[in-house]
């Protein structure tokens, strides 16, 4: 019984370490404005957190809704357009990668914020105030 609990704890710790490492890489790539590496890191992060997300949250991140970008010149980009599908659609077109660089960086930034918000709501970043593991920090 104790062995199972220890294994679960160790797996959970390894999972959170992977997420932390990916978030650190996101920070580095965003500071370097390295679009392709930042995008690839966000894709990997999405795979890690997708198991914790509801279907509607996964669709919000992947872009399986009406916020698809067909022609970037005719729209006012917002955070709603920040989806993995839209970003990959722009990155995979070499002309767009150069012409719309600032737009792509905005979308990457917005998508990462969305992911972090979902991760926080699932207690993957900071523990909840009610989490008994935080009791030691409350005095």
Image (spheres, helix red, strand yellow):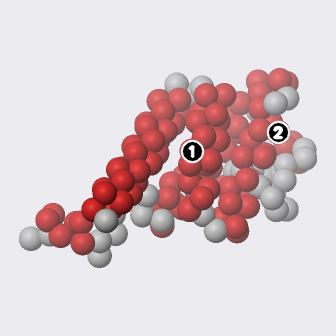
Looking at the picture, tell me which residue is in the foreground, 124 or 60.
Answer: 124
Mark identifier at residue 11: none
The local crowd at label 1, few if under 14, some if 14 to 19, many if 20 or more residues have their Cα within 10 Å, is: many
Residue on which disc 2 sits: 89
Q: Where does residue 44 sit, x and y in percent of width and height?
A: 60, 40
Q: Nearer the observer, disc 2 or disc 1?
A: 1
Residue in view at x 85 percent, y 24 percent: 95
Q: CA distance from mark 2 to mark 1?
A: 19 Å
The answer to whether residue 105 is seen in the rendering is no
The answer to whether residue 37 is seen in the rendering is yes
Residue in view at x 73 percent, y 53 percent: 62
Left/right placement of residue 135 relative to residue 4 reads: left
Mark identifier at residue 45: 1
Residue in view at x 60 percent, y 63 percent: 53
Residue in view at x 78 percent, y 46 percent: 85
Q: For mark 1, give the secondary structure.
A: helix
């Amino acid at each position: 019984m104790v062995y199972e609990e220890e294994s679960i704890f160790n797996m959970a710790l390894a999972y959170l370490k992977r997420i932390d490492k990916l978030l650190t890489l996101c920070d580095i790539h965003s500071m370097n404005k390295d679009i392709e590496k930042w995008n690839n890191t966000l894709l990997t992060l999405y795979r890690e957190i997708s198991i914790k997300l509801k279907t509607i949250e996964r669709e919000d991140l992947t872009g399986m809704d009406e916020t698809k970008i067909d022609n970037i010149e005719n729209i006012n980009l917002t955070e709603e357009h920040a989806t993995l599908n839209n970003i990959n659609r722009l990155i995979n077109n070499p002309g767009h990668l150069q012409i719309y660089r600032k737009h792509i960086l905005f979308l990457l930034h917005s998508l990462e914020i969305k992911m972090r918000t979902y991760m926080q709501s699932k207690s993957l970043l900071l523990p909840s105030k009610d989490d008994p593991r935080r009791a030691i920090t409350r005095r």
